Amino acid sequence: MAYRNIVIDGKDDGFLRKKSRDVEVFDEKLWKLLDDMKETMEKAGGVGIAAPQVGILRKAVIVEVEDEDFFLEMVNPTIVKQEGEQNENYEQRNVQPHQLVEWVAWNEVRTCALQDD
């Protein structure tokens, strides 16, 4: 595993706003990317990270699952259902250091994705 630099919003020429492509090949290169993303997220003190945040425009995400002590690796995820109320939140994000960012999130989101067993 290796730490990767985190792309900083506003210093990236709009990179984080570009559309990511589906992952089509499931090989050692993908598994290394996922391992690197997990290490980068842990070192940055985050609870989730997407491939574009480490400079790769592919649909791959890692999320730390609270109270379960494991990481969910999702490839080509799509949102299939959103439930509950939308809540406004403020947090500091690794892609926007030294700024509080307002964001809106659903209480519950269901996704469909390929997952490594």
Image (cartoon, grey):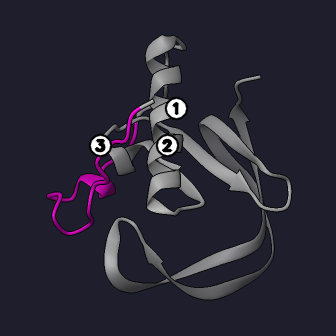
Q: Position of residue 10 (x, y in %)?
A: 20, 69
The residue that appears at 74% across and 40% down in the rendered structure is 112
Give the quadrant of residue 54: top left
Question: Which residue is denoted by mark 3 in the rendering?
Answer: 55
Q: Is residue 85 above or below residue 25?
A: below
16 w.r.t. 38: above or below: below
Q: Is residue 55 highlighted in magenta?
A: no
Kindly indicate whether the residue at mark 2 contacts the one at mark 1 (C-beta within 8 angstroms).
Answer: yes
Q: Is the stretch drawn in magenta largely helix, strand or loop?
A: loop
Q: Mark 1: which amino acid? A: Asp
Locate residue 9 relative to residue 35 in the image: left or right. Answer: left
Q: List x then y, in percent, for residue 110.
A: 79, 54
> Position of 60 compared to 95: left or right?
right
Establish if 65 lies above or below 73.
Answer: below
Residue linked to disc 1 = 35
Which part of the image, by quadrant, shows the C terminus?
A: top right
Q: Nearer the viewer, residue 22 or 117?
A: 117
The quarter of the picture where the N terminus appears is top left
The mark lying in front, picked from 2 and 3, is 2
Question: Residue 39 shows which numbered tag?
Answer: 2
Q: Please name the amino acid that badge 3 sits on.
A: Gly
Q: Which residues are magenta?
A: 2-20
Quick one: SS at disc 3?
loop
